[in-house]
Image (cartoon, grey):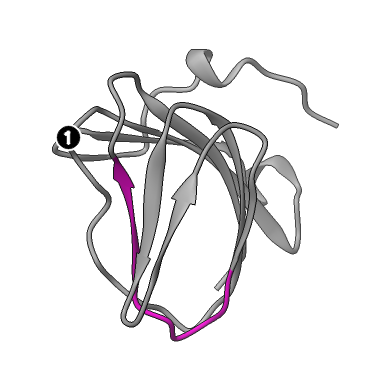
Amino acid sequence: MKVCNYRDVPPDKEIPGVALHLVISDQDGAPHFAMRVFEVQPGTSTPFHSHSWEHEVFILAGRGKLRGNEAEWELAPDHAVYVPGDEEHCFVNTGSEVLRFVCCIPHH
């Protein structure tokens, strides 16, 4: 088992305005899924992208939008999000505070 504060885990990948903390991975003995915590600064977004795997997201703090090819959805604390595989998407911080969310993905 593992218990940690995500703030104690250095960002795994830095995109301008976005910090990605890989808090649980296969290196921790988790054979199927990885858990990541994203921090998206105001006025920035994750890259618009797609991949073959699904992911599930839970919004912890901040306000934003999930953008897809055909639609966009408002995001706020306590919202749960499902993004199917092969769907282009990005998370945009439209608020004045950090948009923070947990994202779980299968190992690929």
Vertical comparison of 18 with 61: above or below: below
Instruction: Return the residue nearer the eye: 81 or 34.
Output: 81
What x and y, as percent, mark residue 90? 32, 60
- Give the crowd class for mark 1: few <14, some 14-19, many >=20 residues within 10 Å: some
Q: Is residue 88 magenta?
A: yes
Residue 106 image position (x, y, % from top left) = 64, 66
Q: How many marks?
A: 1
Name which residue lies at 24% across and 66% down.
Answer: 48
Q: Is residue 98 magenta?
A: no
Q: On screen, 67 above or below 21?
A: below
Q: Amino acid at mark 1?
A: Gly
Where does residue 28 sit, x and y in percent of width and height? 69, 40
Q: Is residue 71 left or right of residue 55?
A: left
> Residue placed at 38% from the left, 74% from the top?
71
At 36% from the left and 30% from the top, the residue drawn is: 11
Q: Considering the image in quadrants, where does the N terminus appear?
A: top right
Give how far across and how far down residue 42 sits, in percent: 23, 28
Range shown magenta: 83-93
Nearer-the-camera pick, 74 or 26: 74
Where disc 1 sits, the SS reads: loop
Q: Residue furthest right?
A: 1
Q: Which residue is mark 1?
A: 43
Image quadrant for the C terminus? bottom right
Q: Hey, which quadrant is residue 105 in on the image?
A: bottom right
